[in-house]
Amino acid sequence: MVAAIGVLLGALVNLSGPGHYVNWGFIQISYGNLIVIGLMVITFVAAIAIPFHRRGGRS
Amino acid sequence: MSKTKTFKPDRDVKPWTGGYRPYDIAKELTVCILAVLVITIGLAVIFGSPDEKSVTIQSWSNANQVDFAQTAITELDGSSASATYGAPYNNVADTGQKIGPLALESWAGVTHPVDPPKDFVLGPLSTVTGAPGVQAALARYNAASPAQQAKWQKAYEDAVKNAKEVNGVLVVPPGPYGPVGPMIAYLTAMAKSGALDTSTVAQSGFFSTDYTKPLLFISDGAYLADLGTTHHLSGDQWGMMNETGSFPGQAWLWLYTMWYQVSPFNNANSAWGANADALIWALMMLLTVILALLPFIPGLRSIPRWTRIYRLIWRDYYKGRV
Amino acid sequence: MTATPQTDVASDPEVEKQWTTKIRKALVKALPPERLIPDRQPSYLSSWIYVFGALTIGALTWVIISGCVLALYGPTWWHTSSVGLFVNSTHLWSVELFFFFMVIHLWGKFFMAAWRGNRQLTWITGVVTFMISVGTAFTGYLSQTNFDSQWIATQAKDGINSTGAGAFFNVLNFGQMLMFHITLLPVAVLALTVLHVLMVRRRGIVPPFEVSAKPDATPAASAPAANEGGVA
């Protein structure tokens, strides 16, 4: 039980191994940062594209 | 009350004469707080956080006593990065970065004095008791003329380039380095025992939380620098925005670190490269001021209207109008 | 015996002269309760992008709470306790989410040109809050008491020293950096966030661009309309 909580409080996915990097011209970016930035762009586009319907359908 | 001035669409608005509808902002804020809690706990449980153990002078010298000895001699002879740094650590001529004529670094003065030969080598060695060999070597060194000391230092620095670790013992090829040999050998032993970690911090008092001296000492060696490069954290690896392991880092520092990767800042031999830190900081300050004062800058403040992304954001309103 | 009605006290010229009365009246005039905590919004607010300010505040809430838990046990607790490591992880990820939501909020406000209609200070307080947040995160990384703190300190010292600021702001001084991180900078971030939100309440949410092609000859409204902020 204690061990299970210990694992839960630690991490299910181990990100402590060596990182991976994308090299593009002079740009060098880690997978972690690339994913975060990519998610930000996707989230921004989704936020302005997805309709914001009012409850009750009031115009 | 409206002022009579020309309407500028990127600066001004017309008063809203349209409708309002009920909206529960307290509920919205509560939902947002709870949603972020769920996401935060989820990410923490799945990914955890990085924790690479700190380097100590002890761990450094035990991992690589050759690098330690090679660094120690540069501290003694005053050629290390810390010894030749200048303000705010010590008074060294022709140091300090400039922004044009502004020598801000030098002007700020020496406010955290660090004297590497004394603080990192001679001082710790002078605290040794019960080791007559080293105490005699130190006395001989201190009694010699600066010219003689310099000869011993140079001889040791030449010899230690070919030093090796044999069965856990530092072996430096023989040379005319006099007392410097035993001094550095004993300093290495002190480092491996942890005594230097304590003495470099405790110089500031029992409760010191100021790690200036041990951090400068450690950063003068190749060991810490190699660790940084391994973790992809060096300045020329976009390191400022990276984190150890595969964790996301500080993506918001992308522009700050980008300038270090491009010409002319990445050319250490040019004036631009030599003053890169100061110049890039000044550039980032300028860009920050431009961002803050964007509302007042014609052209830049028109970009939102030109790019028409607002047509998507307010499409319900525009549909109603049409 | 009848109690003196409050209205009699309020019209007393002695009371009217008081700093307290003048301050209260100025505050209530600038931000009447229905504008401070509005229960309605203009009908053009119809997009998910508007949620990102509140999401940023949500993230900041957990940054502060997780930071307070870390403070309860001291700066090295998380290295030796699995609960501490978990709390540290929540602190890290709430910070990542804070910047994630704040920058998307910035993008949204930029493309809305949200500084229009006398809202320049709202924009400026937002940018300054962003910059101070970057500094707060920086001192946080310095406070981790591990290799990352050591590396960041020894690297950043060159940049900060080059400006002369290193003579005062010593990134190698853990005690100084920790105190900046847990007291001075969070107070600054909170104060600026409050100021920023109060500015949003005072000016109301910026209305859309007009879509007419012709340049408009009508005078501009530089002050917010009386009905901005929810009063019909």
Image (cartoon, rainbow, N blue to C red):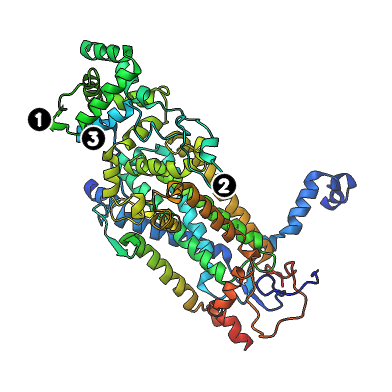
Whether residue C144 is visible here, answered yes or no, is no
Q: Residue furthest bottom?
A: B322
What numbered label is drawn on residue B67? 3
Q: CA distance from mark 1 to mark 2?
A: 55 Å
C163 above or below B15? above
Q: Give the residue type at disc 3.
A: Asp
Q: Secondary structure at mark 1?
A: loop
Q: Which residue is mark 2?
A: C188
Residue C97 sits in quarter: bottom left
Q: Residue at x 64, y 73 (%)?
A: C207
Mark 1 vs mark 3, CA separation in Å: 16 Å
Residue C24 position, x and y percent, is: 76, 51
**Residue C23 or B71: which is nearer the viewer?**
B71
Q: Going by the image, does B131 lie left or right of C213?
A: left
Three-letter amino acid code of the residue under disc 1? Asn
Q: Nearer the viewer, residue B311 or B242?
A: B242
Q: Residues within 10 Å of mark 1 (few under 14, many from 20)?
A: few
Calculate the distance from the C-alpha at mark 3 to the C-alpha at mark 2. Answer: 43 Å
Nearer to me, B34 or C204: C204
Q: Secondary structure at mark 3?
A: helix
Q: Closer to the camera, A42 or B198?
A: B198
- Judging from the image, mark 2 belongs to the subunit labelled C
Q: Is residue B306 above or below residue B200?
A: below
- Of badges 1 and 3, the one in the foreground is 3
Quickly name the residue at label 1: B167
Nearer the camera: disc 1 or disc 2:
1
